[in-house]
Amino acid sequence: MVARETLAAYLDDALSDSETAHVEQALRQNETLRRQLRGLIQERDRGEHSVGAVWRRNRLSCPSREQLGNYVLGVLESGPHDYVEFHLRTIGCAFCHANLSDLQAQQQDDAPQVQQRRQRVFNSSAGLLKGKK
């Protein structure tokens, strides 16, 4: 079953390719889900202004991308870390999962560059340290 939050993320184009494919497959097979998606689109089109709609639309409960980046690096303090864990694991926010996946991919892509940069700095510093006595 596809949750309403996932449908909203689908509309916002905030899902990974595999999640998008899963939602589209489910939409092809399930009339009830298609009705739910149409209802969600209508709510957005008429500019629903309930507290819940404004909260969801502006992602007020979502951690910032910076906080998610710090989560990936493992440098968040315990309170914010626990909240991000709750938001990702319990709430299952598709938007934040997509952001997190992007940040993790960037971190993996940057790993060789970081090592090269560290080596360059070390090599340039090693000569300076040898001359000092």
Image (cartoon, helix red, strand yellow):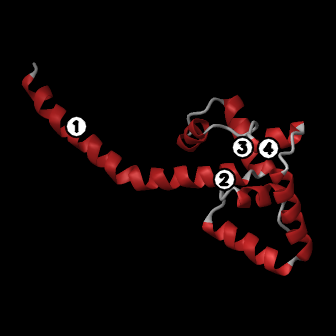
Instruction: Identify whether 3 is placed above or below 106.
Output: below
Work out how far the residue at label 2 is from the one at label 4, CA to CA, in angstroms: 15 Å
Q: Please name the residue that numbered disc 2 is placed on.
A: 97
* Label located before the other in sequence (2 or 4): 4
Tell me the crowding category of disc 3: few under 14, some 14 to 19, or many 20 or more residues within 10 angstroms, Cα based: some
In the rendered structure, which amino acid carries the disc numbered 1?
Phe
Q: Residue at x 81, y 53 (%)?
A: 45
- Residue at the outermost top position: 133
* Label located before the other in sequence (1 or 3): 3
Q: Please name the residue that numbered disc 1 is placed on.
A: 122
Give coordinates of residue 54: x percent, y percent. 81, 39
Work out how far the residue at label 4 is from the one at label 3, CA to CA, in angstroms: 19 Å
- CB within 8 Å, label 1 to label 3: no
- CB within 8 Å, label 2 to label 1: no
Q: Quadrant of the C terminus?
A: top left
Give coordinates of residue 24: x percent, y percent. 74, 73
Q: Please name the residue that numbered disc 4 is placed on.
A: 56
Q: Please name the residue that numbered disc 3 is placed on.
A: 85
